[in-house]
Image: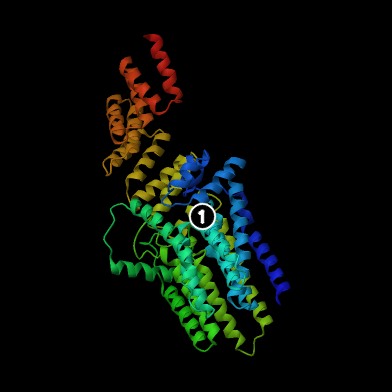
Amino acid sequence: MTKHGKDLQWLVVTVVAVSILVFFSVTGFEFLNYDDHLILYKNPAVLQFDLDTILTKQMAGDFIPLTLTTFALENYFFGLNPHVFHITNILIHILNCVVVIFILYRLSNRDYLVTFLGSMAYTVCPLHVESVAWITERKDVLYGFFFLAALLSYLKYLDGKTNYYILSLIFLTLSLLSKSMAVTFPVILFLIDYLRNRTFKFVEKIPFFLLAVLMGLIQLNIQTRARVNPKPFDLFLALENISKSLTFYVSKFIWPTKLAAYYDAAIVKFSVVDVSLTILFLAMAIFIALKSDLFVKRSIVFGIALFLICIAPVLHGIPYGNGFIYADRYFYIPGLGLIFAFATTLSSHFKNDHHFSAKNILRGSIPVFLILTFISYGRVQVWANSEVLWQDVLENYPDTVFAFNNLGGYYLDKEKYDLAVETFEKSIIKNPNQTIYVNLGLSYLHLNRITESIEAYKKAVAMDPPSDQAYFGLGNALFLSGDKKSALMAFQECVRVKPNNADAYYNMGLIYQEWNDLALAKTYYEKTLSLNPKDPGAIQNLGVIKKLE
């Protein structure tokens, strides 16, 4: 047992208890209409445990085969029970918080004060809530676990336990298969050499780089294909994205206010306070480093460099992927570097002040951690369901069209059509677009406001690119209005845009059957069944037609 063995044991107990306190309510939360449907509950690969697709195809712009496998296993044994998926996220996060304790203890040269401050800050960091409370972000906590396990194994390898080298490689492989952000891991190994004043060992790091490069190329290929109308590289835009992103993460880490599930980069503005906090943190770190011993200097540089390297893939110096400029979840592993630098800075400062003892520092930090615990607990409640989530975004950033769209979609799914109409109409005022008009048309249709539905759908079909859903919805509204001829034309346009829309073929069959053109009705019902062999309406109507022949 180390000289701080008992203290570390109590710290583990404390971290586990605090994590449970903060996140326990998540176990009763719902699925969200925020990628959960794409990744999980409407994902055929997960629902059917299709390993071929899981292991070889990208999902929602990411290659995350191990993450999807965990979802498929949970669905296989427990069904689509959101509580099970949430519990798994919480358990993995608790493991991560525990592993962080032992990583910080080794990185800090067995400094318990740095370990305590850093591990508690990591446990109650409000920016981490999104990664744990959102089922889709299993990829964060899972890649985080294997990333941290690989890092701890490598540190043990450096301490003379050579078997841990292979274990570190295995953990890195699993981390990369959970989320591609782990590609930065090999660079971190050089930072550890720097921290420990160790000669850079290039050869021992080659296997780590080979794994990272392979995954990096796979992800780059996926992201490149996912980009629509990619723009040429703009140096000034890149520098702007990087500077804004760094200001965002540092300021939110120090002063975690106006956090949200979604940040529209065009809406998020940085105040003087945000910029000042970022500059103040860097200035304080530099000042403490300059007046401290060599190891503290290296520790502060290491922590800041760890943060910068791990966050680099999502700073959007080169725009790619889904376009999120800022997101709390991006801080989950990179934040460890900032936390280590912060804890080292505070510890060094107070240790050099004779008015403070280690015990006084520990006691003085408790109110701060209690406040952060309270803030994190409050952030957790925001993820209870889609309605609360998007209302929270709109409370903090009222002009976020993406939040209006998703909130309206939630009301539509829950058959709260009046609220859906109200929400979509607000969204159109801010940013009229095709998707909103389609959803508004559907909401009107459910309320039997047929004329307004037709007008909404007509506005949708007038926009580019052509949308099969817009034409399909317009066809339905026209059909209910009694204009069967115009409805037929809309359905024909629908299948021109999307030839495999089985419902459009079925509706055309209904129209021809109503017009007593049984031959054409039969043709369209047969086409429907070729695309959807279990369509009950097509089966029944085709049977009726065959009896009349």
Position in image of residue 230 (x %, y %) = 29, 56
On screen, residue 285 versus residue 526, left or right, reads: right
Position in image of residue 40 (x %, y %) = 51, 45
* Residue 124 seen in the figure: no
Q: Amino acid at mark 1?
A: Lys
Q: Quadrant of the C terminus?
A: top left
Task: Give above or below for 536 relative to 440.
Answer: above
Question: Which SS class for mark 1?
Answer: helix
On screen, residue 18 versus residue 224, left or right, reads: right
Which residue matches tag 1? 139
Task: Give above or below for 474 relative to 277.
Answer: above
Category of crowding for the residue at label 1, using alpha-carbon neighbours closer than 10 angstroms: few (below 14), some (14–19), many (at least 20): many
Q: Quadrant of the N terminus?
A: bottom right
Position in image of residue 331 (x %, y %) = 49, 65
* Residue 421 seen in the figure: yes
Q: Residue at 55% of width from left, 74% of height from top?
A: 340
